[in-house]
Each structure stands twice: as C-alpha cells, then as structure tokens.
Image: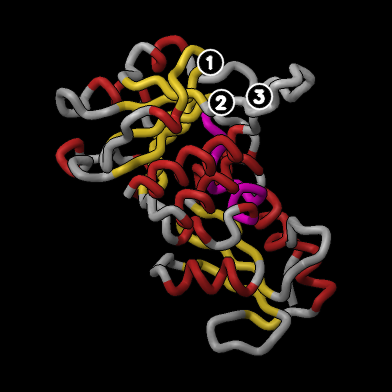
Amino acid sequence: MISRNTVKFVKSLELKKNRKRERLFVAEGPKVVGDLLSAGFRPRDVFSVTDRPDATLVSAEELARISFLQHPQEVLALFEIPDSSQQPLAIESVQGRLLLALDGVQDPGNVGTIIRIADWFGIDTIVCSMETADAYSPKVVQATMGSIAHVHIIYSSLLEFLQNLPAGFPVYGTLLDGSDIYRQPLSAEGVIVMGNEGNGISEAVRSMVSRRLLIPNFNSSGNTAESLNVAIATAVVCSEFRRRG
C-alpha cells in the first residue's frame, strides 16, 4: 500500500528544486527503468504492478496515483541523480571526441529527443547551459526512451566550457549566416552547439563558434517553414557528421 506521504513525495519531484534537494528523479516504464538499472543507476524505490524482486508490489490504481503519465506503464522508480551531472567535464578528455552542447534549449520534449538522438549517433556526452531544461524532469526522462541511461549529461557554464577547450578544437554551430553543411569539411572531433528554440545560439556563445554551419532549405518556392525544430536539426547535423565517418 502506498501512503499519502509517498504519493506527495513522488509528485514533489516534478519540481526541479525538489529534485535538486533530494538528488532524485522519476523514471517510468519497463524499458526506461530497465535501461537505467542495467546502466548502474542506483534506485531508491521501485514500484511495480508485477511481482519483481527489486520492487514494492502495488496495484494499478496505486501506480496511477504516483505516475506522471496519462497511461502508467507497469513500473515507476526513483533514481539517484548522478553527482557527475554537476561536475565540469575534464577538458583533456575531449580530444578525439564529438560532443553536443545545448545553449538554452528549453522544451523538455526537445531535450529528451536530443538525448535520444545523441545515443543513436554514438555521442556519449552533452554539455548543457544552466538555462537548458533539466534532463531529469519526468517529461525529459520519458522522452529519452531510456537513452538517458547511456548519455552523460553535464550542466555548467557553457561559455566557460567553450573558452577552456584546447586551442584549435572545433566548435560548430548552426547559424543562419553559416555555410552549407553538405559542402563543408567536418572533423571527427569537436563540439556541436545547438541553440534555443526561438533565439538560437546566444550572442556570447556564438562568439565561440569557429565553424558556422547552415542546414540548407531545399524548397525553392519561398512558401516554406522559417526554421527546423531544434531536435530535428540536431538529428540532421549528427547524421551528417557520422556519415562522413
């Protein structure tokens, strides 16, 4: 039986300030919970409608009371937020790697999808500005479909991170004054910066971009969308980087 206090506590983790204080986040569904467990994330509590050794057995009605989903998915767990999410990335570790950086991406669905995209394209680290939506909110976690278990998420001053990169380390950004991504050389290492949904890459971070890219619009009629969704743009850019090998 789930107590009222437990329901209240789980629901409180919808707020970032409570997740930060408790160092806990909510994950739901057999795949998401299973991936996190397999990746070594530490569960504080697991609630399941099916009998499993690592969980408290609850009814479907009880699970619905603590779930953030319209249709609860059998299991809900509270996991510890990794301490590394607030620790700066060791600059010497970036050599030879392709990383993503999010500059003020605020929509939880976009952040979750970008984490999933990073996982698909073998990018294991995302550096997020402090203005970027919290990767451990329930909406973001569910949007990752378990990929949050495989991608290292770091929150820090993005500008400071870029300023401390090794000299000459490529910093890519998608900008309206950029050059056609399909005609530009792309390196096997670098940081790909993706900007805010409405304003793009901030002025300060833009000044650190050494290689400006543009995803060209192939609709010549002039009657077309103004821009791509940031998550879709991320997928296009990552795909082109990996296609080049």
Q: Is 20 in front, or is 166? A: 166
Q: Is residue 55 visible?
A: yes
Amino acid type assigned to the residue bearing label 1 in the image: Leu
Q: Residue at x 53, y 40 (%)?
A: 236
Specify the segment rendered in magenta: 132-142
Q: Amino acid at mark 3?
A: Ser
Q: Residue at x 16, y 28 (%)?
A: 166
Q: Residue at x 66, y 46 (%)?
A: 14
* Structural crowding at the residue carrying mark 2, measured as other residues with C-alpha within 10 Å and reported as few (<14), some (14–19) or many (≥20): few
Sequence-first disc among 3 and 2: 2
> Which mark is in front, 1 or 2?
2
Asked whether 51 falls inside the magenta stretch, the response is no
Q: Secondary structure at mark 2?
A: loop
Residue of label 3: 227
* Res 76 → quadrant: bottom right
Q: Nearer the viewer, residue 8 or 220?
A: 220
Residue 130 visible? The answer is no
Q: Position of residue 193 (x, y in %)?
A: 42, 29
Circle 1 Cα neighbour tier, 10 Å, few/some/many (<14 / 14–19 / ≥20): some
* Quadrant of the frame with the N terminus: bottom right
Q: Position of residue 159 (x, y in %)?
A: 34, 20
The residue at which mark 1 appears reads as 176
Q: Is residue 139 magenta?
A: yes
Residue 216: which numbered mark, if any?
A: 2
CA gap between label 3 and label 2 equals: 10 Å
Q: How far across and down, in percent of the image, does residue 234 sit? A: 52, 38
Q: Is residue 207 above or below residue 89?
A: above
Disc 3 secondary structure class: loop
- Mark nearer the N terminus (3 vs 1): 1
- Residue 196: quarter of image: top right
